[in-house]
Amino acid sequence: MTTIVKQTTKLIAGMIFMYGIYVIVHGHLTPGGGFAGGVIMAGSFILLILAYGSDFLKLLKEESGTTMYENLAMIVVLFLAVSGLLIGTHVFFLNWIPKGTVGHLVSAGILPLYNIFVGIEVAASIVTIFLALIIFKEEVSK
Amino acid sequence: MEIAISVITGFMIIGALYAIHARDLLSAVIACGIVGYSLVICFLLLKAPDLAIVQIVIETITLIIMVAVVLDSTREEKYQKFDRQGYFTAILSILIIVVLFYFMMNSVSSLDPFGEGKLRMAQSYVEGATEKTGSANLVTGVVFDFRGYDTLGEATVLVTAVLGVLTIMRIKGKK
């Protein structure tokens, strides 16, 4: 791509990433949440790869990283769900952390934690699919 | 509002039909985009901003990926001649459409008017969600608290889809 595209991407990608984090963290207060924010975060990475070409991030190494983050986040979500079985009334998906005041950033008990880890999982999954397609193309053209 | 949604649904049908019959695959992909973005407007008219955000972001990412894939292909669709088997398939699909339409009309006539039906379950979700979950956004309260199993299933489906893509999209086997 041309220099203009590269410089604009360099300026914008970080802001898109921050906006994804905002949507995830405020998921229990405003519209949005883990799924939407995760895809926005993945979008910033896809923008970088599209602008700088496939050599930019040393893709083969990145792919194993994203796969690992995706699976780890999924396991953490499962552990959070199972932790409800150990505490209080012993129900799967129990909201056992104190709920706090409605409308504050730190409130709603365990829901923000679910949002954050589902967000990581979704972002890593979509980046992994994109990288798999790029690596497939590189392997074919070799 | 019903008129607006009907018009937008008409646009979606036209876009989908064009996507099937377009000769250039790039214009077919962009016609699929009409369907997705019209769905966003439908969600906004029905007052569902959560769904609208997810749909608009997913649609954009899918469109980028599909355009990147199509630009690397020959961009032309293969056409087959319309032979005897084609006629049989066409008659069969028209028959299935008639049967499905008949049963759909039967079931629609017994529904409540649009936007006024009140399920007992939904009522109790809407009334008690904020106190029970402590979440100001009611959708998050339902998705991660009342319907936690569903969300766990969705996330697991995504992980499985990624594993499938990684398994299929590999020419050389990974040791």
Image (spheres, coloured by chain):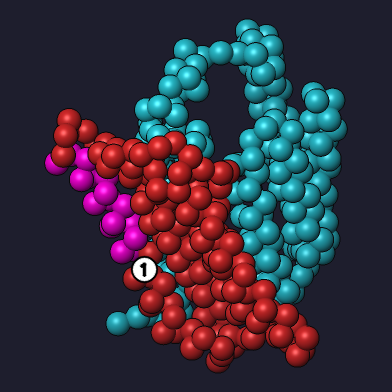
Chain colours: A red, B cyan
Look at the picture and state if A24 lies above or below B39: below
- Based on the picture, tell me whether residue B3 belongs to the magenta stretch: no
| Nearer-the-camera pick, A8 or B160 | A8
Q: Residue at x 71, y 48 (%)?
A: B36
| Nearer-the-camera pick, B117 or B138 | B138
Q: Residue at x 45, y 48 (%)?
A: A105
Q: Residue at x 33, y 57 (%)?
A: A74
| Nearer-the-camera pick, B108 or B61 | B61
| Nearer-the-camera pick, A140 or A91 | A91
Residue A133 relative to residue B80: left or right: left
Q: Give the x, y percent position of residue B108.
A: 66, 14
- Based on the picture, tell me whether residue A76 belongs to the magenta stretch: yes
Residue B89 relative to residue B135: left or right: right
The image quadrant of residue A6 is bottom right
Q: Give the x, y percent position of residue B25.
A: 77, 63
- Farthest residue in the left direction? A86
Can residue B16 be seen here? The reply is no
Magenta residues, start to end: A71-86
Q: Give the x, y percent position of residue B73.
A: 70, 74
